[in-house]
Amino acid sequence: MSKSRQQKPAAWLEFLGSMNLAITMLVVIAVASVIGTVLQQNQPYQDYIIKFGPYWHEIFKVLDLYDVYGAVWFLLLLGFLLLSTSVCVYRNGPGMLRDMGHYRLSMKEKSLRVMRNFREWTLGDSPQQVEQTFTQYFNNKGYRARRKESEGVTVLALMKGQMNRLGYLFTHVGIVVICVGGLMDGNLGLSIKEWLGEIKIEKRDIAAKEVPPVSRLSPAENWSFRGNITLPEDSVSNMVFLNIRDGYLVQELPFAVELKEFRVKYYDSGQPKSFESDLVIHDNQLEAPREETIAVNHPLIYRGYAIYQASFSDGGTKMQLKAWPLFDSNPQPIELDGKVAAKRQIETPDGVMTIEFEDFKEFNVFPADEELAVAPNEEFDQSEMVRGGTMGQSGKKFTNYGPSFTFRLRQPNGEAREFVNYMVPVRQEGRYFFLSGMRESQAEPFRYLHIPADDKMSVDRFMRLHAWLNDKDRVRRIAEQSARQAMSEANMQDKEMLQNIVTSMVRLTSEFNRGGYQAIDRRIQQTVPEEQQMKVAETYLKILNTVLENLYWELLQAEDVALEQGISTEQGRWFEDAVNALASMGPYSSPFYLQMTNFDLRQASGLQITRSPGKNVVYLGCVMLIIGVFMMFYITHQRLWVMIRPEGEGSRVMLAGMGNRNQNDFSKVFDGLADELDRHYASRQ
């Protein structure tokens, strides 16, 4: 073999085992780990698009930053660091071990004199006495000694802190062990199977039982994973979902997990204080099911699987609802049932629409003003928190807006809007409102409809007023009465003018009912010259208010409200709030208002189940790394040499030393030793 060919493997080994390469890879891995910690991993791609936008989402996706610890490039870096560190241990380890037992007895006088730490004495004791004194002294100081005599010159080689060398080995071997554990828990095997077509990432939103075998993993196929499952109360599952990029895999378990009960407690601020789950493990290897309670930071370890309490959500709460028809003259609601994560269809004037129930929240807590912000309702009191009340400590108050539910209303053409409706009325500026938020996409904030509550804390009066507004015959009759009264006061008897006024009032009321003030404003801008728009707008508003006020007056009479003294201040404020709500019905974009009247709460526990055989390997590597760093930084490898030459009836003694770390600190140690020897011999004279 030629010399150049022999040099190539050596050059590669030197490159792989170089400190510069290892430090570079450590820095890159550290930066990647920071990204993986800061950027929440394995979330749905839609969440990342909303958060970062399409441009940065695609860049992060290409770089595989959504699954850093499972990315191929990260595992390759980890493997390369493992190789580099292993080569470093292979090249330098044997030499360090040999150096621990090598006392270097062949040191020459010239070499000792050029050392930074050097002392010399001329003593009256014989070389044998000097050797005995120095040997005993340094043995008491913890130094191990080796002796060599040649041509009448005695050399004592002393060494202390040899374990410092083991520190380097423990540190490097610890890194190797950590890399091995990291690779054991990586998903490189899954990536290889995906490349080979043995598994396929499922991207469809289908039930777990419908996931095909090519997207399922048996316990024997995947020995390391981190999966999640949302388990409703009184349900059982023997699988978890592994989030991978924009899809998932189903990981089967060798046992089944049942959730008997989920409990949660809250702080006054509404944040969860603690939550725990009562689990039952069903396994053929058990004589009887195993019951355990888990909580945050208190997982259940079973057969090498760790079951963590990760989150909680709704598990299919059932709701009793009323669908109040809007833009309909019938004020009677339709009673229906709903369930979170379920769908149901409802007939509307615009066709059959689908209600998709998404979520339910029992508590909605926000910072509160001093006054009560939600209407009290004893029927819905709870032991932990009170729906519709304020709570707080040390003067800090929070408001519980009570239960709410979120749903999507999907039209026949497939378009959908998202709504969130609160169950109990909320107090704002001294009045109570039923809140209903609407948005067209999750990227938008909710825009809220404020429906004023009547004196019975219900929506009945408002819904009746709105239904009457959709009753064309009633509106025409009230418009005609209003027009006759106005013309009579002006001594006008023109029937044609009366009909024109009535027609205008009905048309104006209808436009307001369908599109609010914006519809009236658009009509004015389209039909009226610009210089007259302000005056016409004032006239239109007067006409509209006349119809609405008369409609409201008739409504109060139908409710047998005493009006001898006229409309009270509170009734007047309610009317103003009702008109504002009516003006928002057009943009609200729903043919009905969905009101929750009762519910049967069912919660679900978010469990994270992991299997990490490499975890203990990583722990072992961390322990070795800590021990190694401690040895390197707190143990100094010290070497001393004593050379004794006969001189007349006495001896000439030279002491020299060196340390492998901070030379200034070692110099202080050396000077202290030498000074003690000076004082020892000075005291004998």
Image (spheres, rainbow, N blue to C red):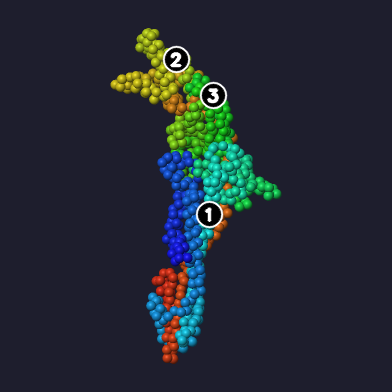
Q: Is residue 573 above or below residue 145?
A: above
Crowd around label 3: few <14 · some 14–19 · many ≥20 (10 Å): few
How busy is the neighbourhood of tag 1: few (under 14 within 10 Å), some, or many (20 plus)? many
Judging depth in this view, the residue of 208 and 20 nearest the camera is: 20
Disc marking residue 183 = 1
Looking at the image, tell me whether mark 2 or mark 3 is earlier in sequence order: 3
Compared to 488, does 649 lie above or below? below
Q: Position of residue 80 (x, y in %)?
A: 48, 56
Identify the residue shown where x is 60% and y is 44%: 239
**Label 3: element kind:** strand
Expressed as whole percent of the image width and height from the top left, the position of residue 542 reads 37, 20
Residue at 49% across / 59% down in the picture? 83
Give the amino acid type for the residue marked by disc 2 in the picture.
Answer: Arg
Q: Picture quarter containing residue 618? A: bottom right
Quick check: marks 3 and 1 in contact, CB under 8 Å? no
In the picture of the structure, the residue carrying the numbered disc 3 is 347
The answer to whether residue 605 is above or below residue 508 is below
Spot the residue most to the front.
1
Instruction: Tell me which corner region of the image, top left, top right, bottom left or bottom right, holds residue 217.
Output: top right
Q: Judge from the rendering whether residue 220 lies leftward or rightward of residue 186; answer left or right.
A: right
